[in-house]
Image (cartoon, rainbow, N blue to C red):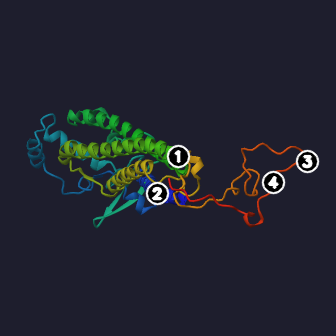
C-alpha cells in the first residue's frame, strides 16, 4: 500500500517532465525538415521578401519618407533603391525565410500561400545572417546598409549562441530528471535529488524561452523598421513560442510536484512494522486477563512454573499443579 501511494504521488511530475522534454524537442526540430508541415510552422521569425520581387516596389520618395519616419539618417533613398535593385536582380532569392533554433527554411509564396521548398542542415549555435545566406557579402552592399545593421547582427549572433546553450542544457537536464525520477519511487531522498535537478531544468528552460522571445521581438522591432524601407517585412511565428512556453509551464509544474513528493507520500506502509521496531512496549490495561505461560521462552508451562526459577536438578522436577489448574492459567484482576 505504501509503495502504491508513492508511485501514484510521483506519477504526475513524471508525466509533466516528459511533456516538457517533448516540447523542447519540438522547438529544436523546428525548420529542419522541408517535407514536414508541422516542423515548418515552428519558426521564431519570418523574413518576407515578396515585395522586393514585386514590380510595384516603393518609389524613391516613398523610401525617403520611411527613412525619415524611423529617423534613419545613415543611408539615403538612392542607396536603398540601389540595394533593392540588386536584390531584385538576384534570382536565387526566395520569397520568404523562416528562422528556427538550429536552422532556417526557405520557400515561395503563391496566392498568399507559403510553401517551403528546402531547409538548411541543423547547426549548433545557428544564427541567421541575411547577407551571408543571400550571397550579398560585398563591400558595396554593406556600405548601403545602416550603421546599426552590424551592431544588431552581432548582438543577435552572441545571444543566439547563449540561447542554443540554454536549450541544450535544458534538454539534457530534463532527460536526467526523468532518469533520476525513478529513484524517487524508493524514498524521499530520491525525490529530493530529483527536485534539485528539476529546478535546474526549469531554470534553463525558462532562460532559453525568455531569450528567444526577447531577442526576436527586439530584432523585429529595431531591424524591422530599417528593412521595411527595403521592402522586407519581419513577423514573429506563433507555434514555436507556444511550444517553448509550454515547456516552461510543464517544467514548473513538474518542479512543484517533485517538491511536494519530498514532503508527502512516504513509501513506508503503516502496517509493515511492529511495536518493537519503534522501541515501544504495550501497556497492560487494568481488569484484564493475561496468560502466564503463553509468552515464556520454554513454551506453555504448568501453573506455578516461573522463568526466573533455576532449572530443576537432574532426575528431579518441580511439583505439578492440581489437575483442575492445568493448561493456561490467568493472573488475577489487576486494579492498577
Q: Which residue is mark 2?
A: 9
Pinpoint residue 141: horizontal percent, then vertical percent: 27, 37
The residue singled out by tag 4 in the image is 319
Dot 2 or dot 4, earlier in sequence: 2
Q: At 53% from the left edge and 53% from the top edge, which residue is drawn?
A: 267
Rounded to the nearest angstrom, the CA distance separating label 4 from label 3 is 13 Å
Which of the pair 127/82 is nearer the observer? Answer: 127
Q: Give neighbour class at mark 1: few <14, some 14-19, many 20+ (Cα, 10 Å).
A: some
For marks 1 and 3, give the one nearer the viewer. 3
State how far apart marks 1 and 4 are (Cα): 68 Å
Contact flag, marks 1 and 3 (Cβ < 8 Å): no
Crowd band around label 4 with a 10 angstrom C-alpha radius: few (<14), some (14–19), many (20+): few
Looking at the image, residue 254 sits to the left or right of residue 268; the answer is: left
Q: Rounded to the nearest whole Å, what is the CA distance between mark 2 and mark 1?
A: 15 Å
In the figure, 78 relative to 31: above or below?
above
Q: Is residue 53 visible?
A: yes
Choose the circle earlier in sequence order: 2 or 1: 2
* Distance from Cα at disc 3 to Cα at disc 2: 66 Å
Describe the element under mark 1 as helix, strand or loop.
Answer: helix
Q: Position of residue 153 (x, y in %)?
A: 29, 36
Per the image, the residue denoted by label 3 is 315
Q: CA distance from mark 2 to mark 4?
A: 63 Å
Which of the two marks, 3 or 2, is nearer to us in this view? 3
Instruction: Looking at this view, name the residue that lies furthest to the right.
Output: 315
Alpha carbon distance from label 1 to label 3:
68 Å
SS type, badge 4: loop
Read off the residue under disc 1: 180
CA neighbours of label 3 inside 10 A, class few (<14), some (14 to 19), many (20+)? few
139 left or right, relative to 4 = left
User: Sequence-wise, which precedes: disc 1 or disc 4?
Assistant: 1
Amino acid at each position: 500500500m505504501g509503495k502504491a501511494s508513492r508511485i501514484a504521488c510521483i506519477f504526475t511530475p513524471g508525466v509533466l517532465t516528459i511533456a516538457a522534454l517533448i516540447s523542447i524537442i519540438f522547438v529544436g526540430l523546428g525548420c529542419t525538415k522541408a517535407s514536414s508541415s508541422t516542423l515548418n510552422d515552428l519558426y521564431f521569425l519570418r523574413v518576407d521578401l515578396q515585395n522586393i520581387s514585386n514590380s510595384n516596389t516603393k518609389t524613391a520618395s516613398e523610401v525617403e519618407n520611411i527613412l525619415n519616419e524611423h529617423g534613419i539618417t545613415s543611408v539615403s533613398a538612392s542607396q536603398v533603391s540601389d540595394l533593392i535593385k540588386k536584390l531584385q536582380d538576384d534570382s536565387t532569392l526566395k520569397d520568404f525565410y523562416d528562422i528556427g533554433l538550429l536552422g532556417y527554411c526557405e520557400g515561395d509564396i503563391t496566392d498568399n500561400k507559403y510553401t517551403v521548398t528546402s531547409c538548411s542542415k541543423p547547426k549548433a549555435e545557428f544564427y541567421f545572417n541575411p547577407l551571408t545566406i543571400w550571397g550579398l557579402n560585398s563591400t558595396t552592399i554593406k556600405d548601403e546598409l545602416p550603421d546599426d545593421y552590424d551592431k544588431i547582427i552581432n548582438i543577435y549572433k552572441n545571444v543566439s549562441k547563449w540561447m542554443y546553450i540554454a536549450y541544450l542544457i535544458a534538454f539534457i537536464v530534463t532527460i536526467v530528471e526523468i532518469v533520476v525520477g525513478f529513484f524517487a519511487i524508493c524514498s524521499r531522498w530520491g525525490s529530493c535529488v530529483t527536485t534539485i535537478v528539476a529546478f535546474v531544468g526549469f531554470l534553463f528552460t525558462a532562460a532559453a524561452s525568455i531569450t528567444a522571445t526577447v531577442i526576436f521581438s527586439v530584432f523585429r522591432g529595431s531591424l524591422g523598421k530599417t528593412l521595411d524601407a527595403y521592402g522586407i517585412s519581419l513577423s514573429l511565428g506563433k507555434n514555436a513560442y507556444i511550444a517553448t512556453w509550454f515547456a516552461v509551464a510543464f517544467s514548473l509544474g513538474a518542479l512543484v510536484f517533485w517538491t511536494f513528493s519530498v514532503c508527502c507520500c512516504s513509501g513506508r506502509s503503516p502496517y509493515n512494522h511492529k511495536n518493537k521496531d519503534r522501541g515501544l512496549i504495550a501497556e497492560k490495561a487494568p481488569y484484564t486477563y493475561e496468560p502466564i505461560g503463553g509468552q515464556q521462552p520454554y513454551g506453555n508451562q504448568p501453573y506455578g512454573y516461573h522463568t526466573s526459577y533455576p532449572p530443576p536438578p537432574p532426575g528431579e522436577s518441580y511439583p505439578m499443579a492440581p489437575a483442575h489448574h492445568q493448561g493456561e492459567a490467568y493472573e488475577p484482576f489487576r486494579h492498577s
